[in-house]
């Protein structure tokens, strides 16, 4: 009985739909329209993503730097400026751009300013013994026999170190004795009295950022004679974590 009723109802619906008399269902049509619109949006999004992928592909991590270099090259050509030189010297790369003008010609050209077989005479120094070498790399409070100077080395890779950047990091000297610091690192450093950020930093001594005492390259030296008893901490202004101490008795 139910089957017969269902068949009759189905036939009636089919006939009504053919004649266009089937009641309209605006709510269902609206739902179907929303679903259809969503599918269309999804399809367009996927198409857009595919177009982007096909256009650019995998651009790689160097894309931004390549674009920047291309822009710089275009601007230099537009304003008739010389091309920016490619820097490969690790000494220059480890030095902040604002301090690179202070580097010596030897430092920027990659020279290591070799000191084997000679002593690095600084202003006012008479550190010369025929045939001696300025052995400061890895020295442990060695004393120069010719001038009674105490040697301190700025060790290789000092910019990544703290209280071991200077070797030895803490030394004891007597009043009137001179301490000589030698830069055995390829980076630019300073020897500045006091502590980083203090108002009196550099008051007692400072190798500086330029001039003959600046430790701008490997082999450069700076010296200071201590004429008063006291405790003299010091640091590098370019790498404040590098610290050392001189105790004068």
Image (tube, rainbow, N blue to C red):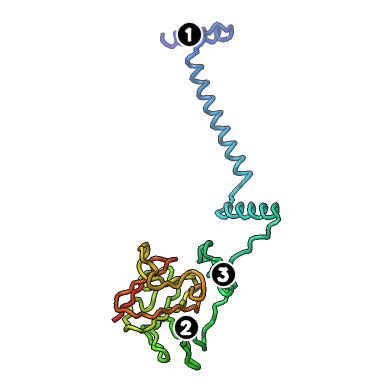
Above or below residue 20? Residue 72 is: below
Dot 1 falls on a residue whose secondary structure is helix
Mark carried by residue 89: 3
Residue beneath the point at 58% across and 67% down? 88
Dot 3 falls on a residue whose secondary structure is loop
Please name the residue that numbered disc 2 is placed on: 124
Residue beneath the point at 58% across and 6% down? 19
Q: Which is in the foreground here, disc 3 or disc 1?
A: 3
Q: Is residue 232 left or right of residue 96?
A: left
For label 3, the crowd category at 10 Å Cα-Cα, with few meaning under 14, some 14 to 19 and many 20 or more, is: some
Above or below residue 94? Residue 150 is: below
Distance of mark 3 from mark 1, alpha carbons?
90 Å
**Quadrant location, the C terminus:** bottom left
- Which numbered disc, 3 or 1, marks the residue that appears first in the sequence? 1
- Residue extending furthest bottom? 130
**Quadrant location, the N terminus:** top left
The image quadrant of residue 40 is top right
Query: Could you tell me residue 92's position as x and y percent?
Result: 54, 67
Query: Could you tell me residue 38's position as x and y percent?
Result: 52, 27
């Amino acid at each position: 009985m139910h089957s017969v009723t269902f068949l009759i109802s189905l036939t009636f619906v089919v006939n009504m739909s053919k004649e266009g008399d089937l009641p309209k269902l605006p709510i269902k049509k609206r739902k179907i329209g929303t679903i259809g619109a969503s599918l269309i949006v999804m399809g367009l999004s996927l198409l857009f993503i595919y177009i982007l992928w096909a256009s650019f592909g995998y651009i790689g991590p160097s894309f931004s730097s390549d674009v920047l270099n291309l822009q710089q090259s275009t601007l230099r050509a537009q304003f008739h400026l010389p091309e920016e030189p490619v820097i490969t010297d690790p000494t220059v790369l480890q030095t902040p751009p604002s301090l690179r003008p202070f580097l010596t010609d030897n430092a920027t050209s990659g020279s290591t300013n070799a000191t084997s077989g000679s002593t690095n005479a600084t202003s006012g120094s008479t550190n010369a013994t025929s045939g001696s070498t300025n052995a400061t790399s890895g020295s442990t409070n060695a004393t120069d026999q010719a001038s009674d100077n105490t040697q301190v080395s700025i060790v290789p890779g000092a910019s990544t170190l703290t209280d071991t950047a200077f070797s030895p990091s803490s030394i004891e000297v007597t009043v009137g004795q001179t301490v000589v610091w030698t830069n055995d690192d390829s980076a630019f450093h300073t020897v500045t009295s006091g502590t980083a950020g203090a108002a009196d930093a550099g008051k007692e001594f400072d190798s500086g950022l330029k001039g003959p005492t600046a430790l701008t390259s490997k082999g450069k030296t700076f010296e200071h004679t201590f004429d008063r008893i006291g405790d003299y901490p010091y640091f590098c202004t370019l790498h404040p974590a590098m610290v050392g101490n001189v105790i004068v008795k």
